[in-house]
Amino acid sequence: MEATPVRAGYDGAAAVASATSEIIAKGLFRAVPEVIVGGEPSVGATLTAAISGHADPVADSYSYQWLADGEEIPGQTGSAFDVPSDLVGSDVTVRVTAVRAGYDSASGVGTASAASQIAPGQYRTLPVVRITGEAAVGERLSAEVTQEATPLPASYAYQWYADGAPIDGAVSDSYRPVSSQLGAVMTVSVRAQLEGWDAASGEAVSDPTAEVVLGTFATTVQVSVTGQPLVGETLSATILLGPAPGPDSYEYQWLADGENLAGATGASLTLTDQLLGKRLSVLVTPVLAGYDPLSGRGEGAASDAVATVSLTLQSVTAGERVVVTGGGHVPGTVYTVELHSTPVPLGSVTADAAGRISQSFAIPADTAPGPHQVKLFDINGVERASVSLTVRAAPAAAIGDGGNGSAEALSVTGSELDAGWAFLGLALLVSGAGLILVRQRRAQQESAAK
């Protein structure tokens, strides 16, 4: 600072004096601003900083800085703050600084904290979920979210229930009921999943399904019947392919001409005379808890009706004749008769209207001694029946003349056979009576001569 004296007639410049003083400091606020933080301290909420008491002297304006656990949050310098999901559990505060020309702002700083630590956010709207699919054992039920939660979650967590009780491990978006849940109603809950948000506040439960019913096998049993349909033989039911899913066991029921056979509930059936001429089949039913057995049932049938075949003799000499008889065959069908093991045609026989056969055949004189099979074949060459026959060696002379026509067959019916035997018996009876009469006459003549 300079001072110059002034007087009339004097040179004031010669008496100029100067002095230097200290720099004037900024003023200090006598009172800091009072701040209140408003809003719900949770993710997704907006916190606001409100001035409840001004600085002294009154500030021209205020600046803001939000902090989390004492650390400044970059970019958050407004009077409002939207809480992000990564601050769950943090203490949030705001620092408010008074601004006035000529005043030290550091002396005008006020702070305030949120009411509590930041809590997870609460979903504003719930999802909507429904169940699709049939409520049956083994069938797939699916949970379908038809309306999303707000805010939009990253995913959903699932829990399935049977009659309101949670099912252990059933936590995917689909479920297949098991047999123990027959009659139960199924529900599913979904919980929205988003970091920083309370999953429980985004949970919804579906409407219940109808009661769970028996499941249905996806495929049926494939079964075949093996064995010859002959009286005395055994037929067996063979599972070629089981149903899906696989059963615990199978049940069997044999039928004759479509009617259940009482007590015939095993995997095999021995054929009796009562089954002669009947067509046999078997129903095979899979057994699996919770599944409708009829949905997996399969049927197998024998290729032909039950028949018989027999020989009048079980042992013959080569070159002799044997009668093949039987019943239960297809009426009017011509069957071929062969001697095995090396096939030798013996002839053919036609079943009568009742399905009976009866035919005499000559066994070739050159047939090798030992056990053989007489076999019956249908017109398709399918073996219909067989019976054992033991052949004895023929005399040398019989072999030489070929057995008087080894393959020639003599066709007879059952009644013709009976008549033939009757005629033969009558002839023998007459011959015997004549022989006795001749002997008596000779005896009388000898007695008279004496």
Image: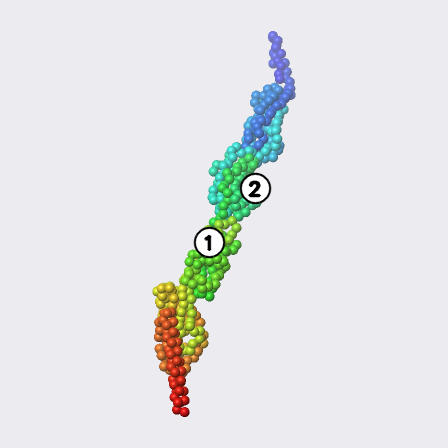
Name the quadrant containing residue 36.
top right
Q: Using the image, determine if residue 25 lies above or below residue 277.
A: above
- Inter-mark Cα distance, 2 to 1: 34 Å
First in residue order: circle 2 vs circle 1: 2
Picture coordinates of residue 394, whole percent (x, y): 41, 80
On the question of residue 322 being in view, the answer is yes
What SS does tag 2 mark? strand
Picture coordinates of residue 162, whole percent (x, y): 54, 43
Q: Residue 159 versus residue 279: which sits nearer the camera?
A: 279
Q: Name the residue that disc number 2 marks.
A: 165
| 442 displayed left or right of 78 | left
Could you tell me which quadrant the N terminus lies in? Answer: top right
Q: Name the residue that disc number 1 marks.
A: 297
What SS does tag 1 mark? loop
Residue at image location 49% in from the left, 45% down from the top? 213
Q: Residue 359 versus residue 414: which sits nearer the camera?
A: 414
Amino acid type, label 2: Ala
Comparing marks 2 and 1, which lies closer to the viewer? 1
Colour scheme: rainbow
Amino acid type, label 1: Arg
| 380 displayed left or right of 79 | left
